[in-house]
Image (tube, rainbow, N blue to C red):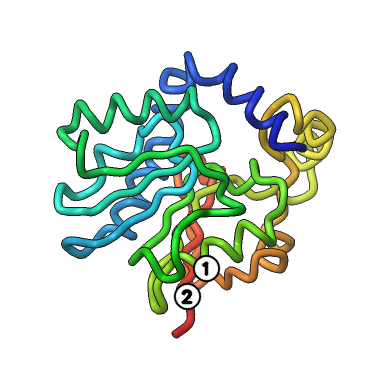
């Protein structure tokens, strides 16, 4: 799956994303933001902010930065931030999660919701999340990880052949993701409908 395929897929998703993926993924968004945004006046980064569906869950005193590679999705996120009264103090911009333009240790916590299986290089993705998070800060990821062997697992492997058209990788084993990214989970729990998605929290050493 290439960046161009991801951009093409999310250009198609953008008009209906909130309707199709809003309600079904809402529990994971709320859980992740509540976990990462527990203290006042934190500097928070959301990687893959999409249309900004998570933005209403942040504390009003949070200093939020959101990035995404899709201009169509990010335009909707900006309108949502404006409607929430954060037109001037929340920063939203187009940026690749695998090559972020932030200084080291820029954020108190980093959140990546339903985006891990869309990146082309998980190792670079994990390295960047760790780099921009301050030592001792949390990295909170919500994503689907591959099911155990069975009908669902077989379906995910078959769908994996079409990852470029889908814009994400359906066959996405947790152990491989941890090994490639270096993100060592300190917390793993189900997030969302039927436990199909998983919340993973890692802490940057230091």
Residue 174 position within the rendered picture, expressed as x and y whole percent measured from the top left:
67, 58
Mark number for residue 130? 1
Residue 86 position within the rendered picture, expressed as x and y whole percent measured from the top left:
19, 37
Judge whether 81 appears above or below 113 on screen. above
Dot 2 falls on a residue whose secondary structure is loop
The C terminus, quarter of image = bottom left
Q: Residues within 10 Å of mark 2 (few under 14, many from 20)?
A: some
Left or right for 85, reference 124: left
Q: Residues within 10 Å of mark 1 (few under 14, many from 20)?
A: many
Foreground: 140 or 206?
Answer: 206
Question: Mark 2 sits on what residue?
Answer: 204
Mark number for residue 201? none
Left or right for 18, reference 99: left
Residue 98 position within the rendered picture, expressed as x and y whole percent measured from the top left:
61, 53
Judge whether 69 appears above or below 185 on screen. above
The image quadrant of residue 12 is: top right
Foreground: 77 or 191?
Answer: 77
The image quadrant of residue 80 is: top left
């Amino acid at each position: 799956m290439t960046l161009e395929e991801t951009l093409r897929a999310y250009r198609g998703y953008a008009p209906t994303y909130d309707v199709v993926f809003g309600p079904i993924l809402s529990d994971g968004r709320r859980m992740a933001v509540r976990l990462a945004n527990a203290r006042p006046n934190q500097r928070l980064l959301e990687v893959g902010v999409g249309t900004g569906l998570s933005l209403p869950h942040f504390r009003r005193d949070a200093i939020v930065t959101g990035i995404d590679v899709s201009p169509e999705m990010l335009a909707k996120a900006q309108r949502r931030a404006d409607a929430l009264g954060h037109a001037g103090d929340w920063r939203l911009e187009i940026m690749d999660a695998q090559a972020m333009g932030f200084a080291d240790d820029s954020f108190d916590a980093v959140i990546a919701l339903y985006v891990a299986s869309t990146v082309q290089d998980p190792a670079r993705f994990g390295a960047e999340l760790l780099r921009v998070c301050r030592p001792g800060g949390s990295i909170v990821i919500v994503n689907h990880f591959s099911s155990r062997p069975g009908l669902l697992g077989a379906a995910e492997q078959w769908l994996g052949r079409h990852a470029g058209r889908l814009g994400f990788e359906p066959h996405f084993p947790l152990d491989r993701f941890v090994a490639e990214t270096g993100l060592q989970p300190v917390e793993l729990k189900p997030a969302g409908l039927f436990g199909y998605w998983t919340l993973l929290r890692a802490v940057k050493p230091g």
